[in-house]
Amino acid sequence: MEYFVYIIYSKSLDRYYVGHSQDLDDRMNRHNSGRSKYTKIARDWEVKYTERFSARSEAMAREKDIKRKKSRKYIEFLVGKDVG
């Protein structure tokens, strides 16, 4: 099985969200339909970055690593885009 770490961006909020999922299409559907607790405030989320992993534990560790940095600059470095 394949797992993804993803970074999505909402232009209306000017905010990034980092997560992991096995089914990225379904997860994006939930983000943009308001069925996700932390992203339901916006409906314009777009995938900006993904990484693939063969194990869920690896994806979870990478997600945690990105979030631990608490850095928008680092996220924008990964995404390769300065939204500023």
Image: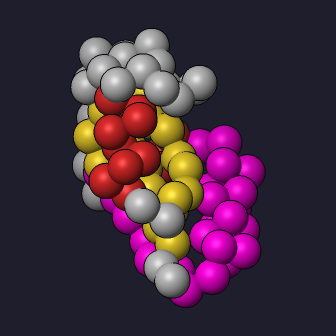
Percent position (x, y) of residue 69?
68, 51
Question: Which of the two residues, 60 or 74, is positioned nearer the viewer here?
Answer: 60
Q: Identify the image's colour scheme: rainbow, by chain, secondary structure or one colour.
A: secondary structure
Q: Is residue 76 visible?
A: no
Residue at horizontal 31 percent and vertical 21 percent from the top: 43
- Residue 10 percent coordinates (x, y): 33, 28
**From this viewpoint, is residue 15 visible?**
yes
Q: Is residue 84 above or below residue 77?
A: above
Q: Residue 29, relative to residue 14: is it above or below?
A: below
User: Splitting the image into 4 quarters, where does residue 15 fall?
Assistant: top left
The residue drawn where x is 73% and y is 51% is 68
Residue, x 48% and y 79% (percent of image)? Answer: 2
Q: Is residue 73 above or below residue 3?
A: above
Determine the residue positioned at 65% across, 73% down. Answer: 56
Figure quadrant of residue 52 = bottom left
Q: Is 39 left or right of 69, judged from the image as shown?
A: left
Front residue of this view, candidates 12 and 43: 43
The x and y percentages for residue 78 are 41, 60
Above-or-below relation of 16 to 5: above
Q: Residue 65 placed where, x, y %?
A: 69, 61
The segment highlighted magenta reads: 48-71
Q: Seen in the image, is 41 located left or right of residue 47?
A: right
